[in-house]
Amino acid sequence: MKIILKSKSSHSHYYNVTFDFSDGKVRILCDCPHGDWKRVCRHRLAMINGDKSILFDKKQADQLDAVLKALRQPGFDGELISYYKRLQLIEKQKSKRDDLVRQVNYDFGQKLNEGISVAVN
Ligand SMILES: [Zn+2]
């Protein structure tokens, strides 16, 4: 089974995301520049995540549902979810780190204005 869905792009055209189910595997390809370099792209991630707002053609929503149903089958979901969860965990850690950097920068800025204790001889 091969299903090709059109993904919105930041330009006016679209990218093709291909879900190719064969030989007990699913290949998920995207013809955007990241996809061509075998890198994860937002188009594939959004579709794997079931985000229908990424669809260029809203009439393909039923096809995306069919793809998602197939991806949730035992055998496919394990490895896919493992990668997905790892990415989510890293994003969460990144977000916490960014919050910490903002907080320390804020505190530092406040201290610089309020005055920092210095030993004066
Ligand atoms: Zn892409």
Image (tube, rainbow, N blue to C red):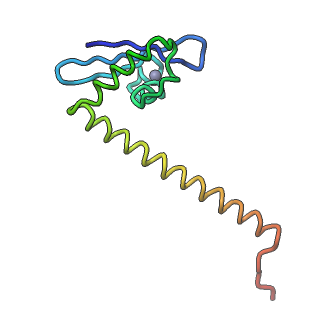
- On screen, residue 115 above or below 121: above
Q: In this rendered view, identify the residue nearer to me: 114 or 22.
A: 22
Q: Position of residue 22 (x, y in %)?
A: 21, 17
Q: In this rendered view, identify the residue nearer to me: 111 or 89.
A: 89
Q: In this rendered view, identify the residue nearer to me: 120 or 45.
A: 45
Q: In this rendered view, identify the residue nearer to me: 90 or 48.
A: 48
Q: Position of residue 67 (x, y in %)?
A: 33, 21
Is residue 65 found left or right of 41 in the rendered image?
left
Q: Position of residue 109 (x, y in %)?
A: 76, 63
Is residue 69 found left or right of 121 in the rendered image?
left
Quarter of the image for residue 38 reads: top left
Residue at 25% in and 18% down: 21
> Is the N terminus in the top left, top right, bottom left or bottom right quadrant?
top left
- On screen, residue 79 above or below 11: below
Residue at 50% in and 12% down: 57
Quarter of the image for residue 110 reads: bottom right
